[in-house]
Image (tube, helix red, strand yellow):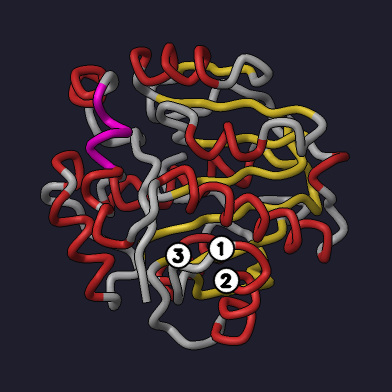
């Protein structure tokens, strides 16, 4: 088994903290996973392929979808998605990270926000994805963050949350080696599913992913065969948005 890189900046983490690391953040992530023989761009491409297959299977092909990359950081995942979607928007709390994302992915739109309410109207997107963001959100703020993802997706649309698997020792090794992951609390697939369900989403899929460092059809096939085994380096939880959302208390 191997482990991928995270995307980072997220609500709950201070914008100033991520601003300070923006210039060298991707290099730091790549160093933390160098033992896998792969870099963060490799894993981002694999995630994009997986998201494309799953979205199409649930009636939301990427080519026809308005996609939100929540917690986009410096645009690693957005870069992998660019050209595959009808419209791509990234959002983040760090203006320095966003500046780097705009430079690297000129085809996408990147927007800043306050880490509390996403700056988009209800139902603005067909699909929202948060890639290795939730573990940077303080536990008390996670229900609100997930509720916001569901809010900005059209009824019947999809929300995909990808996270590090806390039960994978190589994932923990990578997290321990990444400076901006210091003190984070990793989130299990079950906990992500509970958050999505609690905010009113209908969980339709859980996949454990990245069981090997292989790319292309071989790596994808291994992940398909093993997706129900809770030992992959990361996991993906997919939910459909209902017609009416249950808001967390106080929202």
Query: Which residue lies at the image location 63% right of the left edge and 70% below the top edge?
Result: 220
Q: Secondary structure at mark 2?
A: helix
Q: Earlier in the sequence, mark 3 or mark 1?
A: 3
Q: Earlier in the sequence, mark 2 or mark 3?
A: 3
Which of the 4 image quadrants contains residue 51?
A: bottom right
Q: CA distance from mark 2 to mark 3?
A: 24 Å
Disc number at residue 192?
3
Q: Secondary structure at mark 1?
A: loop
Disc number at residue 215?
1
Question: Does 78 appear above or below 208?
Answer: above
- Asked whether, in this view, residue 171 is left or right of residue 72, the answer is left
Please give the range of residues in magenta: 24-29
Question: Does 71 appear above or below 161?
Answer: above
Disc number at residue 219?
2
Check the picture and name the quadrant holding the N terminus: bottom left
Query: Which of the two discs, 2 and 3, sits closer to the camera?
Result: 2
Query: Which residue lies at the image location 58% right of the left edge and 74% below the top edge?
Result: 206
- The spot of residue 194 in percent (x, y) is 47, 69
Q: CA distance from mark 1 to mark 2?
A: 5 Å
Q: Contact, CB < 8 Å: mark 1 with mark 2?
A: yes
The mark tally for this picture is 3
């Amino acid at each position: 088994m191997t482990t991928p890189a995270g995307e980072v900046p997220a609500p709950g983490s201070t914008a100033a903290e991520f601003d300070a690391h923006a210039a060298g953040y991707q290099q730091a992530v790549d160093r933390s996973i160098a033992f896998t023989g792969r870099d963060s761009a490799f894993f981002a491409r694999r995630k994009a392929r997986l998201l494309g297959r799953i979205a199409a299977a649930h009636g939301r092909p990427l080519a026809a979808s308005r996609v939100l990359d929540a917690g986009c950081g410096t645009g690693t995942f957005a870069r992998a998605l660019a050209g595959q979607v009808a419209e791509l928007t990234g959002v983040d709390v760090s203006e320095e990270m966003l500046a780097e994302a705009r430079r690297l992915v000129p085809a996408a739109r990147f927007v800043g926000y306050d880490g509390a309410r996403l700056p988009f109207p209800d139902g603005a997107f067909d699909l929202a994805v948060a890639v290795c963001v939730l573990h940077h959100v303080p536990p008390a703020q996670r229900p609100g963050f997930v509720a916001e993802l569901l809010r900005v997706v059209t009824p019947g649309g999809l929300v995909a949350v990808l996270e590090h698997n806390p039960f994978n020792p190589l994932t923990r090794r990578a997290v321990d080696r990444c400076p901006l992951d210091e003190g984070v609390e990793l989130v299990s697939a079950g906990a992500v599913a509970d958050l999505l369900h609690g905010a009113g989403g209908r969980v339709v899929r859980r996949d454990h992913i990245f069981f090997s460092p292989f790319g292309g059809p071989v790596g994808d096939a291994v992940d398909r065969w093993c997706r129900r085994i809770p030992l992959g380096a990361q996991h993906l939880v997919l939910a459909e948005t209902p017609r009416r959302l249950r808001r967390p208390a106080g929202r």
